[in-house]
């Protein structure tokens, strides 16, 4: 993955100062939070399904090698091919070899975070093959040469005016007086252009929400018909998925599907839930002549048996991102990673290393909303804290932060000295707060007070208040 997470601080500054972005981000809580809450409340067994989903994924991860082997065997029995990719380089190489074998000049792609992770588009272009994104959001950001800013709504950082401008810039056939001011007109224009590309493509790439070991099926969940067209109209269908997407049975898959769309978009089910099991059979009216699955590891097997294994339960619903106050303020691109928000703050350091992405776990208030809405009950705050600890242990934090913690630790280990210092500081800060009891400027804390006020203390420390209360109790007795 191409990372700019080391620029998190400057990325955040740019995002906070971008008026257009801030306006677009205001739609995130409006578009997701209430819908998810209503969908969950309408399903009596929603919490029970969350528990069951966690159990299914934990069982699968504990026996991942066995289920992957079973899945591979079923794919082969169904006439498909399975390719194992240890690294992103391996995945790109295998994908290119399949395309070159069929002399592909154009390929269509359904929305896939895994192909974004391995930078497949860039690799295909470098080798003379044109990738065409067919998901509307992915198509829009491809026109802009951008990365997704959200794992299920990749163009959520844009407004209608920007999209219209990009369409008019690229779709040179558009008449100047054609009305493009409504979402429906933009959608119709994208559909008209993309329909032609499906028939031009020799190979279609999709990701997979699930891989079913029982049947050898790959499953995609979409709200557009592009996924189905991508995998059925080309001569070859290539599924690129990470190894943790496997589930044991169709029954297991169906149980998790009941909480996936509800958690992601507030729908009971997505518009399309498509199961693909091998290439076209003799009596099938349509479908690909070849079916390939590229199984990507790229650091995931190293997470097994560690404090970050639970992250592999993630089903990419985006609920943690939709509810994250930090994401609401800075958007996805500020994270400098393909995976933004709380899930990205855990997953990206796991895949790329804490030395490259150690700043991301700090982009959290630890409010716990992410864990409370995660359909797989992933303890995201706990794992972000583990990454913060590793960042500190490896001296990767800025010197000012390390020295500040060291000074605090010095006093914290000496209770009498700590209490004496605090008993002096609290009244001073109380006076600094004035009649409003709010501190708008504080030395060594400008990063906080620049954007918000700090509540001033009442003038007493907790221990002083406690001692006073105990003294009053004794007098009363």
Image (cartoon, grey):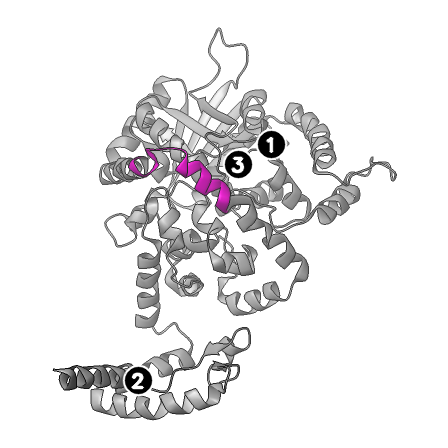
Query: Which residue extends farthest top?
Result: 283
Which residue is depicted at the point 38% across and 83% down?
458
Mark number for residue 96? 3
Residue 47 belongs to magenta span: yes
Residue 396 rendering spot, x and y as whole percentages: 38, 72
Q: Is residue 426 above or below residue 120?
A: below
Query: Which residue extends farthest front?
Result: 476
Residue 465 belongs to magenta span: no
Res. 3 in view? no
Q: Secondary structure at mark 2?
A: loop
Q: CA distance from mark 1 to mark 3?
A: 11 Å
Residue with the mark numbered 1:
107
Please tell me whether mark 3 or mark 2 is closer to you in this view: 2
Residue with the mark numbered 2:
461
Res. 16 in view? yes
Stretch in magenta: 33-48
């Amino acid at each position: 993955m191409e990372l700019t997470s080391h620029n998190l601080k400057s990325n955040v500054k740019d995002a906070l100062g971008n008026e257009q972005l801030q306006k677009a981000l205001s739609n995130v809580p409006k578009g997701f939070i209430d819908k998810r809450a209503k969908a969950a409340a309408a399903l009596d067994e929603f919490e029970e399904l969350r528990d069951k989903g966690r159990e299914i994924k934990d069982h699968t991860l504990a026996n991942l090698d066995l289920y992957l082997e079973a899945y591979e065997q079923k794919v082969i029995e169904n006439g498909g091919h399975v390719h194992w990719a240890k690294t992103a380089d391996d995945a790109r190489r295998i994908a290119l070899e399949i395309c070159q074998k069929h002399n592909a000049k154009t390929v269509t792609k359904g929305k896939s975070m895994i192909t974004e992770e391995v930078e497949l588009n860039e690799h295909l272009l470098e080798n003379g093959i044109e990738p065409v994104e067919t998901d509307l959001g992915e198509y829009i950001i491809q026109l802009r040469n951008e990365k997704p800013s959200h794992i299920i709504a990749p163009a959520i950082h844009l407004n209608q005016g920007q999209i219209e401008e990009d369409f008019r810039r690229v779709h040179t056939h558009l008449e100047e007086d054609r009305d493009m001011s409504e979402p429906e007109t933009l959608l119709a224009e994208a559909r008209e252009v993309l329909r032609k590309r499906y028939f031009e493509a020799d190979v279609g790439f999709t990701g997979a929400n699930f891989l079913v070991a029982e049947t050898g099926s790959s499953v995609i969940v979409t709200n557009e018909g592009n996924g189905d067209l991508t995998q059925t109209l080309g001569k070859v269908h290539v599924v690129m998925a990470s190894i943790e997407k496997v589930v044991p049975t169709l029954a297991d898959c169906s149980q998790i599907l009941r909480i996936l769309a509800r958690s992601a978009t507030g729908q009971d089910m997505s518009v399309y839930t498509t199961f693909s099991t091998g290439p076209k059979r003799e009596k099938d009216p349509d479908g690909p002549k070849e079916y390939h699955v590229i199984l990507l590891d790229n650091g995931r097997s190293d997470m097994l048996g560690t404090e970050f294994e639970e992250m592999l339960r993630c089903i990419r619903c985006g609920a943690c991102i939709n509810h994250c106050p930090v994401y609401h303020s800075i958007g996805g691109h500020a994270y400098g990673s393909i995976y933004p928000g709380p899930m990205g703050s855990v997953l990206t350091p796991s895949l790329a290393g804490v030395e490259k992405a150690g700043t991301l776990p700090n982009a959290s208030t630890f409010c716990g909303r992410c864990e409370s809405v995660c359909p797989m009950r992933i303890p995201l705050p706990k794992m972000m804290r583990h990454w913060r600890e590793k960042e500190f242990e490896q001296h990767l934090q800025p010197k000012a932060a390390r020295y500040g913690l060291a000074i605090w630790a010095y006093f914290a280990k000496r209770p009498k000295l700590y209490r004496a210092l605090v008993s002096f500081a609290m009244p001073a800060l109380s006076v600094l707060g004035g009649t409003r009891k709010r501190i708008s400027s504080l030395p060594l804390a400008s990063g906080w007070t620049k954007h918000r006020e700090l509540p001033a203390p009442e003038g007493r420390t907790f221990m002083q208040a406690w001692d006073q209360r105990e003294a009053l109790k004794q007098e009363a007795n």
